[in-house]
Image (spheres, coloured by chain):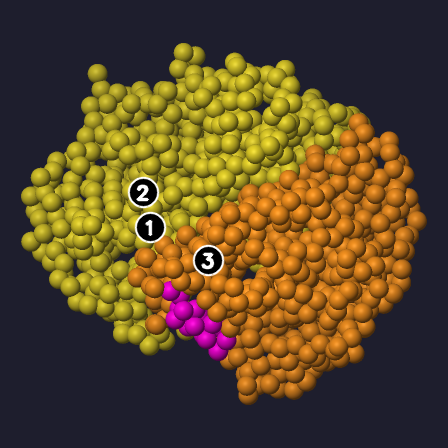
Chain colours: A orange, B yellow
Amino acid sequence: MDGVELQILWSNLIGIVSEQARALQRTAFSPIVREAGDLANGLFDEKARMVAQAVTGTPGHINSLAAAARNLLDDFGDEELKPGDVLITNDPWMSAGHFFDVTVLSPIFRNDRIIGYAGSTIHHSDIGGYGIGSGARDIHEEGLWIPTLKLYDQGEPNETLFKIIRRNVRTPDAVIGDLGAQVASGIIAADRLNALCDRYGLDDIASLSEEIITRSEEATRDVIRKLPGGTYHGKSVIDMPGGSEIVLQTAVTVDNEKGDIVIDFEGTSGPSSMGINVVPAYTHAYATFAVRSTLNPELPNNAGSLAPIRLKLPESSIVNAKYPSPCNARHVVGMHVPFPILKALAQVVPDQVVAEGSGAVWTIQIGGKDADGKPFTSSMFNYSGGMGARAGKPGISAVCYPTGVSAVPVEVLEASYPIVFKCKELEHGTGGTGKQPGGDGQRIGYKLRTGQPWLLNTIPSRLSAPPEGLLGGGDGAAGVFQINGENVVDTRKREMQPDDEVFMITPGGGGYGAA
Amino acid sequence: MTRYSLAIDIGGTFTDAVLLASDGRSFVDKTLTTHNDLLEGFFRGVELVTGRAGIKPEEVDDVLVHATTVVTNALIERKGPPVALLLTEGFRDVLYIREEHRYDMYDPQIEFAEPLIPAERTFTVDERMYSDGTVQKGVDRDEILDIIRQCREKGIVSVAVCFLNAYRNGENEETVRKIFAEEAPDIYVSLSSVIAPQMREYLRASTVAINAYTVPITRPYLTALISELKNRGFKQQPLIMLSNGGVIGAERASTMPVRMIESGPAAGALVACYFSRIFGIRDLISFDMGGTTAKACLIQGHEPLVTGTFEVDRRYRFKPGSGMPITVPSIDMIEIGAGGGSIATVNDLGLLKVGPESAGSMPGPVSYGRGGTDPCVTDADLVLGILAADRFLGGDMKLDLEGAQAAYEKLGQALNLPRDKAAWGVFELVCEQMAGATRTHATERGIDYRGLPLLAFGGAGPVHACMVAELTESTKVIYPPLASVLSAFGTLVTPAQIDLVRSYVTTLDGTDWDAVDGVLKSMTDEGKTALSEAGIRDEDFQFSFSMEMRYLGQQFEVRVDLPEDPRIKKDTAAIAGLFETEYKRQYGLKLDGMQIEVVNWLVTASGRQPERETAPAAGGTDGRGDESRVLQIRGEATDVPVWQRSAVTETDKIPGPVIIEERETTIFVLKDWVVTRHESGSLVAEKTGDK
């Protein structure tokens, strides 16, 4: 296949996943999908290798989804899939690391033969159990566990499963609606892939996918081959409310002959009793993100470009969660995974890395009764701190990094729930100093318009260990989390009084280079 | 008695003028846009066409319509006078925080444009509105007086106000406006509750900031235009083309420049609607390809699709998200960074890439001979033989064929392909990019694009349209007359129209019709005023109503057009039925037993469709395919006949492949297509055979 023909077919595949993602985002009920874009769509070949992904979503979802198709099929076993079958799971180890993320996978048939799969993962508005937060003591407290099952069997809904889901979540209409949106997006993908094959006279996409994956892998290896070989070390320290510290330690080995990179997490903290343990797929997702976005962000993300990056995870480690460890708030640790890797890569390609930033977005969920006594449970919403500085540019203030989500607008939240914000603006001076300063965090204050006690579920991080500056740059400021002016130290779900006020300052990003 | 109407469209490169006579004659011309003083080019264009028609200014007794790029220029150049922004206390950084989103997840080097109004000219006001529209805290007059004093010190000439939840109740913003009107009447005040009364604070603030920023540039411009027209003896007040595809009086337009941004492209989409009526084709795709970008618009039922949000001035590699969002009704345009000047490269994977980088008009493609060295789309067209080196702009501009060939030789080496195959690859890929963008855009709106006819215009549109049609599975391409000045012509087939939107959120079942009456009445009143100003008589007023709704809990709305004013029957069950039908059409399913929520109420106020037509020039005799040239199609040399457009008559049936030349553009029709001439003067290419 020449470079023109391939490019045209490839653009078509990317167009298909983009269509799939747009349809999904527009029909979603979960505000975190619609407003924050917390979703992933991927197209897989007949060997379940990801060949194209939509340009949306978060690294956590997308790179986990990349592995999910294979995992689901292996787990499902030998039964042959038929047209109209749709598989589902929210098994944290199969896909994106916590129950909220439900993955749906549909085989794509052409002339009675499977030529590929369409997959999506979205963050659902509820999954029963504990809700948002890290307070559950084991994974079973965290919600409904859906093993790999058929959601549809030859076009017929699995009524038993639907009934179980409906009875086990707090927002059944939204969850069932969102599953419907996922299934519909798979149908669109199947339809479009067949149209593509018709248009270009293809029986399947096997040779196309082989070409894409081979070229992507080779291009990635070529980039790595140009780097100085060796093993480089990086370490990040983050703190959780309550004062516990977590160390993420990496040794990044660049093999510039084979053109691969191995990241060893030896020295990283052990498992946590809180729900912040990270499954390997999610660790892998953010580790590969760090490498790929640093070395060549232009290269497409697929099975080929991900292959040259491998992980070694210690058996007993917070980044290698084992059953029955709780892992609901795995993003709190997972979104910091890129930083020790970036610190190691700073010794290799100093001009291309990003200094440590606020890392995990701070997630919030509120629930209770409004002024008229009507009960409500909010969807999860999140706020970012400052991004770390780049070699040639300052860090961006108040922007989600490394994740790719957005914040839900204040007016959308105030219209949906009885919440009233007092402030949401930049906290100047929280970004670290340096040749290039880090991005600033933000100050956010809110209370509820209610006469009743209410529930607050929030997950701040970096309240004592601030993001470090890089290569002589100053540290960013640590975050602040207060209720009625008092610092809060624990992270469990908390009952609030009607007049209580929450105030937070998200951390600033680290600076780059001595000022 | 012959009546005349006049249209001037100022674009980035050319200012186009069209004078239409009621007897069907038309006079058109193009002149270079004069960026230092746009009105200079405006009147040069006016003189050219009135001169050719031999008429005096006062004889232009029908409409005088103007589409202009003045607002877009102001935003890109950023040389406007200082403007201030007033926000709710506690939320001063709305323009800096945006949506906290990185628009490209993998690229750590992304940049955002600096806010149009910087922090040092942003003030906060200690006021607060609840989301239900009740006032938590009103505006303190002394605080505003103090801000006015500071504005004076800073030389502020225009102010934007965006208070939280003002989409629900604009009372506090209105108080600010009154105080400014009393104390500082020379400072122009734009209110978010008037300009863009919709939920989502960043979108609204961005929109009102753009409006406030461009008022001090647009107002003097339009005032000068009005007075200069009067000086020259024109009797008609100018009408201004808006992004939504309607025209309104120049004075009203000067208060809402944010609505003028897509003025020219909107006019292009309207021509497509006009031809869709002439041809009796309800649905088609307009396809306008110029030097740096291509624009497409889906026409449905003879009307263009409209959108509520779009983006201007994308700063970082043309990427969506790197520009400034605007939330006002606008024609829903697909804009692709692919035009004649788009540059072809080979990426790290050994794959061909076209655009978004563009050589623009300076230095331009290699073949322009102005120092450009990168192979561009136009160069590929020349290498392939679709364009002829000595025929560009009727031979006024000689193209450098050897230069273009050398550039493609080099590109071919990088791809391991012969030169002509590389050039064909660029031709095919740029067409696929446009087809792909159209497919995605249509799907997102629940429209089946397959088989929709294309209407091709713009300098590069007719060159590529037939190939794009192949890729969107279309079987018909229409090449209208006056293609080179088509947008200007579009303004003359446009009714006066203003689209208004208000957020009033309620469940459909719980609709309070008294409240709805208040919302809709304020909108119809505003519409009536705007139409009167545009010279429309009361008996010609038309109002149509739409609602944007979603299932309770969703975050994205579906627009439903209502058959009549919803206040007449107050029939929520019927409205629910319309919503479900539309939802099912777009997303393939409806959800039973879910509550429906209304978010926005829309009113379109319009005058009647004007009836103006053109008589096409008659067919000529020379250039009836007796010439030919060799084209490199898919790497194979093919001898292709060349026609002159003026020579095609209504009895001709010209089989493809064929080249049909006119002064400003070239039509390239592929094999298995046949070209005929329609009575409107359009050429029509149709696919033959079974596929």
**In the rendered image, which residue does mark 3 sit on?**
A82
Up-down: is A491 above or below A28?
Answer: below
Q: Secondary structure at mark 1?
A: loop
Estimate the x, y position of residue B254 in percent, counting from the top left. Answer: 51, 29
Quick one: label 2, few (<14), some, or many (20+) residues within 10 Å?
Answer: many
Residue nearest the viewer, comparing A296 with B252 = A296
Residue drawn at x 48%, y 78% is A218
Q: Which residues are magenta?
A: A204-218
Estimate the x, y position of residue A449 in percent, counting from the top left. Answer: 81, 33
Q: Are marks 3 and 2 on the same chain?
A: no
Residue nearest the viewer, comparing A111 with A302 = A111
* Cα gap from disc 2 to disc 1, whole angstroms: 8 Å
Estimate the x, y position of residue A402 in percent, counting from the top left. Answer: 67, 62
CB under 8 Å between discs 2 and 1: yes
Q: Is residue B79 inside the magenta stretch?
A: no
Residue drawn at x 39%, y 48% is B438
Residue nearest the viewer, comparing A15 with A30 = A30
**In the rendered image, which residue does mark 2 sit on?**
B452
In the picture provided, is B316 more to the left or to the right than B124?
left
Up-down: is B647 above or below A303?
Answer: above
Magenta-colored segment: predominant secondary structure: helix
Which-is-in-front pick, marks 1 and 3?
3
Residue drawn at x 60%, y 66% is A75
Which chain does the residue under circle 3 lie in?
Answer: A
- Of the two numbered discs 2 and 1 on the same chain, state the one appearing first in sequence: 2
Q: Secondary structure at mark 3?
A: loop
**In the rendered image, which residue does mark 1 sit on?**
B472
Residue drawn at x 61%, y 39% is B554
